[in-house]
Amino acid sequence: MPREAFDISAYPGLTGEEARKRLRGEGPNEIPSPDKRCLASIVLEVLREPMFLLLMASGTIYLLLGEKTDAAMLLGFVCITITITVFQERKTERALEALRDLASPRALVVRDGQRKRIPGREVVRGDVIVVAEGDRVPADARLLMAMNLSADESMLTGESVPVRKPPSEAPSGDARPGGDDIPFLFSGSLIVKGLGLAEVTATGPSTEMGRIGKALSGVKTESTMLQKETGKIVRAFAAAGLVLCGAVVVVYALTRGSWLGGFLAGITLAMSVLPEEFPVILTIFLALGAWRMSKRNVLTRRMPVLEMLGAATVLCVDKTGTLTQNRMAVSQLRIGGESLDLTGYAPKLPDQFHRLVEYALLASQRDPFDPMEKAIRELGLLPLAGTEHLHDDWTLVQEYPLSCRLLAMSHVWRSPDGREYVIAAKGAPEAIAELCHLPEDEREELAQRVEAMASGGLRVLGVSEATFSASGLPEDHHDFSFSFLGLIGLHDPIRPAVPAAVRECYGAGIRIIMITGDYPGTARNIAAQVGLVDTDGVLVGQDLEKLDDGQLARQLDTVSIFARAVPEQKLRVVNVLKSSGEVVAMTGDGVNDAPALKSAHIGIAMGGRGTDVAREASSLVLLDDDFSSIVEAVRMGRRIFDNIRKAMAYTLAVHVPIAGLSLIPVFFADWPLVLLPVHIVFLEMIIDPACSFVFEAEPEEEDIMRRPPRDPACPLFDRETVLLALLQGVSVLVIVLAVLFFAVRDGHTQEDSRTLAFSTLVVANIALILTNRSWNRSLLSILKRPNRAFWWVLGGAAALLATAVYTPVLRGVFHFEELHARDVALCLSAGAASVLWFEVVKRLRNKPGNGRACGLGV
């Protein structure tokens, strides 16, 4: 139907000047997006990190002491790290910017009496817009004229079936989307049939879509539990480091007479105590996890939620477009008492159903946009190809559109050689029954068949036929003598991968709750198809509204399906689940899902069909709309938390000997300071890649998807983890101090003693990395597990240590002496021995019956 079909002379629209004034005064027709961070703000955030401040302070002190080489190395390290960090941050910003892939739709408006195509963002209140099949409505508007108009409002209401749109005879108040015969169009909805002329009543934030978008600002996105716990740990270590730093400065100055040297020793201790790797681990693990997820078509908008996936206990899912494909398909044909189930049916129909499909095709558009007509055409073309039931050479003479009075439409056709008209009608079964003038008993029998089909979650259409031989067609299709042909049942098919994904979620201990705006029968039917448990109990939105939060919490223990739910109720269900201690993930694609997506611990939006508002509110976006990707996301989340825990346990362990070697030698005047800032930087060049890449690349444990969700109340550092990590660190410290003690006692120079102690510490550091890759497997088993990053770190550490020890220039920078073969053997054996005891602990710890309440098998 061409857009020029309307006579727009009665609606000249705004003048160009008036439109420009309103655009300046009311702003563009778009929902405001969050401000982007500039380069300067990113750099300032990096420079505020304590480790960078300490490194710059150390470099400054070296300059004051005249140690220009040491100063240049430290300050150069700062500059390189800042450059890398800024580059990564900017890359992330650009990736998130690309997320806004649904640009404002273009709009056909009437201005100065002429049709004009403009960007959707330039539409203003008072504009007259023309919409037709396939158009995305650019703003909220009141219909002035309409011809057989239907709109898909599922992104706002969750309804999978398009709704009729009649014109408004007079200006009326505001209306909400949902239901037939509402004379308003809503921004973001899709025109699936007909033609309309409408006056814009609201744009941008004032639209129905914008109203929900503004409501999101009142929903606070929570920090994850891991972020909160890590922050507490870092603050505790920082406070301890400051106290010890002050003590070292005073002790060093009093015993060795150098305040600058004392400040240097104090800064070294602060650097050794400050666990700056903790935030680095979180950032790198989550960033690399997001990268891995993107390879599986899952875009991560807020990286911290990845580790939360491992704790998810409830997954709230929308039906339309999430569990289902949001497209109609013919599921059942019925003629009298005979029915044909078309689920998975091959493209061949029994002969008795040919006429029913033939006339359903004739009652539809040849190039349909309506999803129901698309389904009918998809069903009929292949089975009827080559038969006398397809009529591509027939001419459409007249169309009787669907109306509020009669929910049926008719097409009048004439064949090239036909002397009479052929009329095909389809619509609501009761309307077709009225067109056919069926007697009361046949209507009751038909109603029972329709009810049986509807209870199976089907949308039911009736089809009828008629012929007409008079010269002039009647004004109303009621005047034809129709014969009833049969019923067509359509459904919104589920996504093929959903049942398997649901089973895997149940296997991982994750409960599934469906929250939809659709009818209870449809919701129950879809739930049964995808394999949801407890599908008998359904709570509808009206009943939910009568419950207080306590009553709703009790209902949530047994009810897994919520039907006819409005957006506010979806949000309420999520919040009640959260208050009950559940970790909630929520999936959805429509604007109506956005508040619940933002409030949930993990919001998961559909990216292909999903709305911009839903994606902005979500934490994860499924780019291919594949529900099974959620399972991969959960698997990745659990692996990430496992590996974060391993990395942080290693970090805590390795900081114990570093802090001890920075503190203890200060109290012995004849002992050398083993660690200076340059040595801390050297160790960080091993520790950082170990934390960032070795543990991140560690493969998942075999039982990762057979465990229940981890207890959200279980801390990252439970008592057992802290105890074992501290014991590891103390054992390394004891071994290294023993090497240092015997070296000093045997008369080695300060440089030689420092070299022996430092080399032993490096070897022990590598041993710590290896043993902490798994708290279940033996060293031999760990070495067999693929982890290329570990071998790169091992080779890099050996090369760096050899270069620092045997290169004259660097040996001077590090204040080292050359090591002989016997010294190398001592360092290797002592460093390795420092962690061998942990292998015995692993065996005892993993015996049957030694399960841990918070353990994750790491």
Image (cartoon, rainbow, N blue to C red):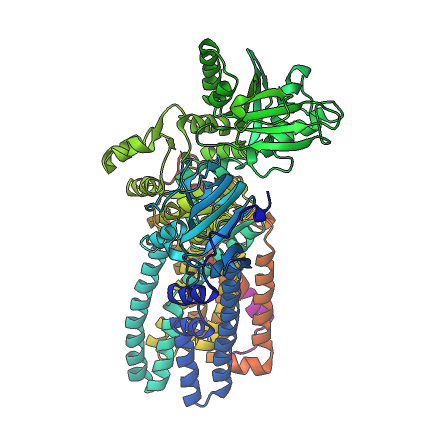
Residue 263 is at least partly visible in this image: yes
Of 598 and 232, nearer the camera is 598
Estimate the x, y position of residue 764 in percent, counting from the top left.
Answer: 49, 61
Taking the view exactly as shown, the residue that stands out farthest to the top is 441
Estimate the x, y position of residue 87 in percent, counting from the top left.
Answer: 53, 69
Of 54 and 220, nearer the camera is 220
Compared with residue 538, is residue 698 higher up or lower down, i.e. above or below? below
Please give the name of the residue rendered at 73% of the width and 31% of the height, measured from the top-left corner.
Answer: 393
Compared with residue 222, is residue 661 higher up or lower down, i.e. above or below? below
Estimate the x, y position of residue 637 in percent, counting from the top left.
Answer: 47, 47
- 561 vs 118, left or right, is left
Please give the name of the residue rendered at 60% of the width and 20% of the height, measured from the top-left corner.
Answer: 466
Taking the view exactly as shown, the residue that stands out farthest to the front is 471
Which quadrant would the N terminus be assigned to in this image? Answer: top right
Task: Count the numbered circles shown.
Answer: 0
Estimate the x, y position of residue 301 in percent, counting from the top left.
Answer: 47, 55
Residue 629 is at least partly visible in this image: no
Residue 687 covered by magenta stretch: no
Please give the name of the residue rendered at 35% of the width and 55% of the height, measured from the top-left corner.
Answer: 214
- Quarter where residue 383 is shown: top right
Of 452 and 302, nearer the camera is 452
Q: Which residues are magenta?
A: 815-826
Of 339 and 43, nearer the camera is 339
